[in-house]
Structures are given as structure tokens and as C-alpha cells.
Amino acid sequence: MRILLIGAEGPVGRAAASALAAHEIVTAGRKSGDLRVDISDSASIEALYQQAGQLDAVICCAGSARFAPISEMTEEAFAAGLANKLMGQVNLVLKGLAHVAEGGSFTLTSGSLDRYPIRKGSNAATINAALSGFVRGAALDMPRGIRINVVSPTLLEESAEKLRPMIPGHVPVSAHRVGLAYVKAVEGAVNGETILVG
Ligand SMILES: NC(=O)c1ccc[n+]([C@@H]2O[C@H](COP(=O)([O-])OP(=O)(O)OC[C@H]3O[C@@H](n4cnc5c(N)ncnc54)[C@H](OP(=O)(O)O)[C@@H]3O)[C@@H](O)[C@H]2O)c1
């Protein structure tokens, strides 16, 4: 398969790339990868698909939420998180449909902060839950047998040292397990699913 992987340089993207290394992988990021894209900018997403050519699968392992206590969260900051991690990934699907082959797939990435909430995490919890709703709804009318799923990992072992103070008590998961979730989404038959890891 020819797979477009956005966000291949982060711990999650590296896990996906390593697990799917048997396929042809085209990587993309703002400053890294084979192609340039900023998922928060829909014109940039359109330009990415023009350069990427025909694809069998699109995987997104990029996107950032905003973190602040709810009493300090502003409308602008909340909307910026939605525009990036939620609408960035939704727009990758809306603008990418015509570029994905029959029977292909989209795999998005959320995270566990909707099911294991943390302080300052209301924006991330909202985005993650919304991504589950998006793939569940979209799966019902995706054209040409194209499937769509979202991988929801908890804290990766690789990120644990950096993120543990923010996310106390989470049991980290290995990159191997996270990678297998992307294999299930791309090579398997699941559709409309939130694939939980941890
Ligand atoms: N790490 C964890 O433990 C963990 C756990 C659960 C969920 N997640 C979620 O998984 C996703 C990836 O996390 P990560 O820790 O691997 O992230 P990361 O270290 O921040 O890496 C992000 C990757 O995405 C690219 N990227 C970032 N913003 C982008 C944008 N606006 N447009 C295009 N590419 C962009 C980066 O490349 P450039 O800098 O070149 O753009 C990089 O390749 C995030 O949504 C995160 O919330 C992470």
C-alpha cells in the first residue's frame, strides 16, 4: 500500500511508521517529512494532496490541543485547539477523499484524555471525544468502501518522563502496542471504531 503519514517524527508517528514499514510510506509535517503540511490550514492540506498523488491510506499522528484550567481557558484558545487537532484531522478526511483509492482508509489519532481526564485537559477531552463521534458517523457514508477509524492511545512509554507530571498515574503503553493499532486500522477491516490502546 502507498500510505501518507502526517506527523511521522513524533513518538506516535514513529510507532505507526515502524509497524507499517512493509508498505510505501510518504511522510509529511510542517518542518519534517517528505512533504510539507500544516493541518490547521486547509489550503495547505489541499496542496499536500496535490503533491502526494494516489494513496491507499492516510494516517494522521499530528495535532495539538490547548491546556489550561477551565477558569482560565479563553474562547480563542479553546477554538485554536479545535481548529488544530479536531478540524485539522476532519479536513484531512474531507479534502482527501478523492485521493484515496477504493477500499482504502483514513486513520486519525486522538488520545485517552476523554476517558481518563486530567486537570487543564477540557480541550483535549472534547477533541478526543469528538474524533470518536466523527469516525463513527462518517463511516456510515464513506464512499467507495473507504474505511475510517481513530486510534486512542494513552501515554506512550517514550513520552512518559516528559508528560508524567501532567498526567499522573497513567500506565504508559509501548510503541509496539501503539503501532499495532495502526496496523489493525490500515490492514484490518475495522470501520468507524475508536481503537483503544491502554
Ligand atoms: N505522545 C503520547 O504519549 C501521546 C499519547 C496519546 C495521544 N497522543 C496524540 O498523538 C498525536 C501525536 O503526538 P506525539 O506525541 O507523537 O506528537 P509530537 O511529538 O508533537 O509530534 C508531532 C508530529 O506531528 C507533526 N506536526 C505537529 N503539528 C503539525 C501540524 N499542525 N501539521 C502537520 N504536522 C504537524 C510534527 O512534525 P513538524 O514539527 O515537522 O510539523 C511531528 O512529526 C497528538 O495528537 C497527541 O495528542 C500522544
Image (spheres, helix red, strand yellow):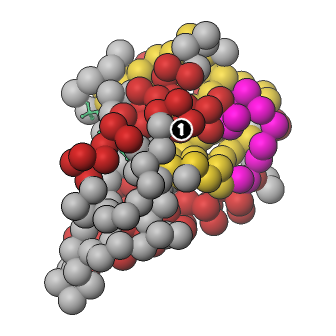
Which residue: 71% across, 60% down? 136
Which residue: 75% across, 37% down? 146
Region rendered in magenta: 184-193
Q: Residue furthest left?
A: 72
Q: Is residue 100 above or below residue 114?
A: above
Picture quarter with ligand 1: top left
Q: Is residue 149 above or below residue 119?
A: above
The question of residue 188 being in magenta is answered with yes
Q: Residue 11, image x and y in percent?
A: 36, 34
**Nearer to me, 117 or 134:** 117
Q: Quadrant of the N terminus?
A: top right
Q: Residue 101, image x and y in percent?
A: 71, 25
Q: Based on the displayed image, in which of its 4 quarters is residue 143 positioned?
A: top right
Q: How many marks?
A: 1
Residue under numbered circle 1: 178
The question of residue 130 being in magenta is answered with no
> Of helix, strand and loop, which one carries label 1?
helix
Asked if the beta carbon under badge 1 is closer than 8 A to the nearest atom of ligand 1, the reply is yes
